[in-house]
Every structure is written in C-alpha cells, then in structure tokens.
Image: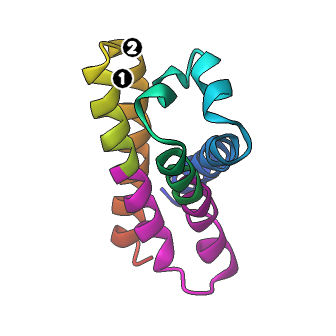
Amino acid sequence: MNIALWVVQIFLALLFISAGGQKLLQSREAMMQGSFTSYAGDFSPGFLRMIGILELLGGIGVILPQATGILPWLTPLAAMGLAIIMAGATNVRLRRGEPQMAIGTAVFMLMALFVVYGRYSLGI
C-alpha cells in the first residue's frame, strides 16, 4: 500500500504543481483560451491566483513532509486540501455542462482522498 500511496502522491504533486504554476504564470485571458482552463472567465484574476497558490502549496505538501520525515502529518492535510479544491472544481465543471471534465476532477479528488485515508491508516 505504501508504494501505491507514493505513486499517487507523486502524480498529484506533479499535477498540482503544474496546474498551480500555470494559474500563477498565465494571465486570465490566456487561460480562457485553453481547452482545460476555459472556466477562467467565470472567476476573477485574484481568485484564480489564490487557487494557483493553494494548488502549488498542496502539490508540495503532498510530497515534501512525508519524504523528509519533517512534520509528516501535513501530507494527509495537504491531500485533504487538494480534495476540497477538486470537489469545488467538479462542481464548477458540472455547472458549466462539462461532464467529461467533471469526471476527471472527481478522479483527482478520489486520488487525494486515497492519500488521506492511506496515510492515516498507515499511521502517517
């Protein structure tokens, strides 16, 4: 189970560091042109930047504390934060009539919840 958790954690870290970085580095207008980020027009630039910061921190937090052994209890908390973000993203996708995208965000949410459950059940 530990190996499966590490694989999922690494995937989530790469995904969210990338997504968060994109939200921080790209303009809202540029994000509105993308097929995966067309939702950007529904939110203010400040809100998108805040989500980007949270995703970046969550991506780092899902790996770094567990890997270093320094405050490893932060890893499942970071994963829970990412799951909450993905629950919101799933809701946005459903409201926009994008069921295929909603499935993807729901899968990422479930992966984050797997990390929460797995790290707590293994005693962090």
Q: Quadrant of residue 59?
A: bottom right
Q: What amino acid is found at the position of numbered circle 1 in the picture?
A: Ile
Q: Residue furthest right?
A: 25
Q: Which residues are magenta?
A: 55-84
Q: Quadrant of residue 23?
A: top right
Magenta stretch: includes residue 32: no
Pick whichever, 9 or 86, lies toward us.
Answer: 86
What residue is pinned by disc 1? 103
Pick whichever, 60 or 9, lies toward us.
Answer: 60
Instruction: State whether the magenta stretch is mostly helix, strand or loop.
Output: helix
Residue in the image at 51% along x and 55% along y: 50
Q: Which element type, helix, strand or loop, lies under badge 1?
A: helix
| Image location (x, y in percent) of residue 100 | 39, 13
Distance between mark 2 and mark 1 Cα atoms: 5 Å
| Image location (x, y in percent) of residue 7 | 61, 48
Q: What amino acid is found at the position of numbered circle 2 in the picture?
A: Gln
Residue in the image at 43% along x and 37% along y: 43
Residue in the image at 63% along x and 52% along y: 13
What residue is pinned by disc 2? 100
Looking at the rendered structure, the number of numbered marks drawn on it comes to 2
| Image location (x, y in percent) of residue 5 | 52, 55
- Report crowding for label 1: few under 14, some 14 to 19, many 20 or more residues within 10 A (C-alpha): some
Residue in the image at 27% along x and 32% along y: 91
- Report crowding for label 2: few under 14, some 14 to 19, many 20 or more residues within 10 A (C-alpha): few
| Image location (x, y in percent) of residue 49 | 57, 51
Magenta stretch: includes residue 67: yes
Q: Residue furthest bottom?
A: 70
Pick whichever, 99 or 115, lies toward us.
Answer: 99
Task: Determine whether label 2 and label 1 are within 8 Å by CB.
Answer: yes
The quadrant in which the C terminus is found is bottom left
Q: Which element type, helix, strand or loop, lies under badge 2?
A: helix
Q: Quadrant of residue 86?
A: top left
